[in-house]
Amino acid sequence: MEGQVMNLQLPYFGAALGMGLAVIGGGLGIGRLAAAALDGIARQPQAVGPIGTNMIIGAALIEGATLIAVILCFMIVLMK
């Protein structure tokens, strides 16, 4: 009986783990992106505009990929 209960809860655990990893990965990616952009701006202050624009586009793409991963993990919970 205990093995059956554990087997039913594994998809929920996997989905929660996937959501957590997606959010952590997205946060680390955006942090590294911001650090690299600030480093580039410190080296060439006249390039603030293009670097800032590219940083915003990159952050939006990372955030979109993170959101899709979280939604897919949430759908796994709802489908089970």
Image (cartoon, rainbow, N blue to C red):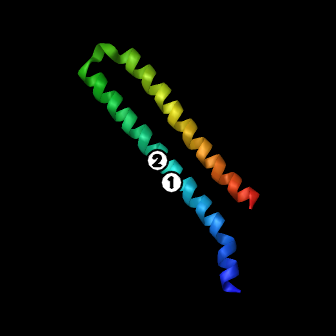
User: Which SS class for mark 2?
Assistant: helix
The quarter holding residue 43 reads top left
Q: Work out whether 27 lies above or below 47.
A: below
Q: Work out whether 5 lies above or below 14.
A: below
Instruction: Point out residue 34 in the picture as x, y percentages from the top left corner.
Output: 38, 33
Q: Work out whether 6 lies above or below 56.
A: below
User: Which SS class for mark 1?
Assistant: helix
Instruction: Point out residue 22 in the picture as x, y percentages from the top left corner.
Output: 52, 49
| Kind of residue at badge 1 | Leu
Residue 60's tag is none
In which quadrant will I find the C terminus?
Answer: bottom right
Instruction: Point out residue 52 in the picture as x, y percentages from the top left corner.
Output: 41, 22
Residue of label 1: 21
- What residue is rendered at 34% in x and 34% in y? 35
Residue of label 2: 25
For this view, does 10 lie left or right of residue 20? right
Residue placed farthest to the bottom in the image?
1
In which quadrant will I find the N terminus?
Answer: bottom right
For this view, does 67 lie left or right of residue 5? left
- What residue is rendered at 59% in x and 62% in y? 14
For this view, does 37 lie left or right of residue 2? left
Residue placed farthest to the top in the image?
46
The quarter holding residue 10 reads bottom right
Instruction: Point out residue 29 in the picture as x, y percentages from the top left corner.
Output: 43, 40
Asked if labels 1 and 2 touch by Cβ distance under 8 angstroms, the answer is: yes
For this view, does 78 lie left or right of residue 43? right
Q: CA distance from mark 2 to mark 1?
A: 6 Å
- What residue is rendered at 47% in x and 26% in y? 56
Residue placed farthest to the right in the image?
79
Q: For the residue carrying disc 2, how many other residues have a C-alpha within 10 Å: few (<14), some (14-19), or many (20+)?
A: some
